[in-house]
Amino acid sequence: MTIAVYPGTFDPLTCGHMDIIERTSPLVDRLVVGIYENPGKRPLFSLEERVKLVEEAIGGLANVRVEAFKGLTVDFIRRAGGRVMIRGLRANSDFEREFEMALMNRKLAPEIELLCLMTSSQYQFLSSSLIKEVAKLGGCLDGMVPDHVAIALKQRFSAAIGLAAGKDEQ
């Protein structure tokens, strides 16, 4: 059985992430989407929220499951029984970063193979950072994130705007 792991923070999940998940799923027996609890970053969504958002998005994919993790990605892949790490590439800058990480991961876990998929052209410009900026400024998210993620983003930022407005009135 081939088990692959697609790790990331997914803060938030984008249509680019879903493209990689949907294209990888038929290639493996099981795909684990690993949601990284990154203590060095301040995510917009909690770990539990990110897990739920991804779980809702992958609902129709029978061989895909979602798990949260912390620590080294290669250790998580081993615990999941994985032999393959999945990564998506958008541009040359992604390649350079992934190449560095691949060399380190090869040193730490030579039994784990890296499989990089090129992002479909309609999603090459997407990044979670840009999505958050667009959402924060009230921009249209159609075709950039799943609908339920767009709703969660709008709710999160409208709540933040409401809190900020309340502080200004005090």
Image (tube, rainbow, N blue to C red):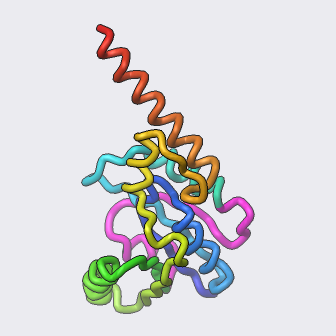
Residue at 54 percent across and 51 percent down: it is: 141
Quadrant of residue 129 within the rendered picture: bottom left
Residue 17: in magenta span: no
Where's the N terminus, which quadrant? bottom right
Q: Position of residue 142 (x, y in %)?
A: 59, 53
Q: Position of residue 38 (x, y in %)?
A: 33, 56
Query: Between 1 and 22, which is closer to the camera in this rendering?
Result: 22
Please provide the residue range marked out in magenta.
Answer: 58-83
Q: Position of residue 49 (x, y in %)?
A: 51, 45
**In the rendered view, does 93 fall on the left or right side of 155?**
left
Residue 70: in magenta span: yes
Residue 108 higher or lower than 169, as above or below: below
Residue at 50 percent across and 83 percent down: it is: 117
Residue at 25 percent across and 54 percent down: it is: 40
Extreme front residue here?
A: 139
Q: Position of residue 148 (x, y in %)?
A: 63, 47
Q: How many marks?
A: 0
Extreme top residue here?
A: 170
Q: Is residue 108 visible?
A: no
Q: Is residue 51 visible?
A: yes
Where's the C terminus, which quadrant? top left
Query: Between 113 and 53, which is closer to the camera in this rendering?
Result: 53
Quadrant of residue 9 within the rendered picture: bottom left
**In the rendered view, does 63 fall on the left or right side of 97?**
right
Query: Between 79 and 107, which is closer to the camera in this rendering?
Result: 107
**In the rendered view, does 65 fall on the left or right side of 42?**
right
Residue at 73 percent across and 69 percent down: it is: 62
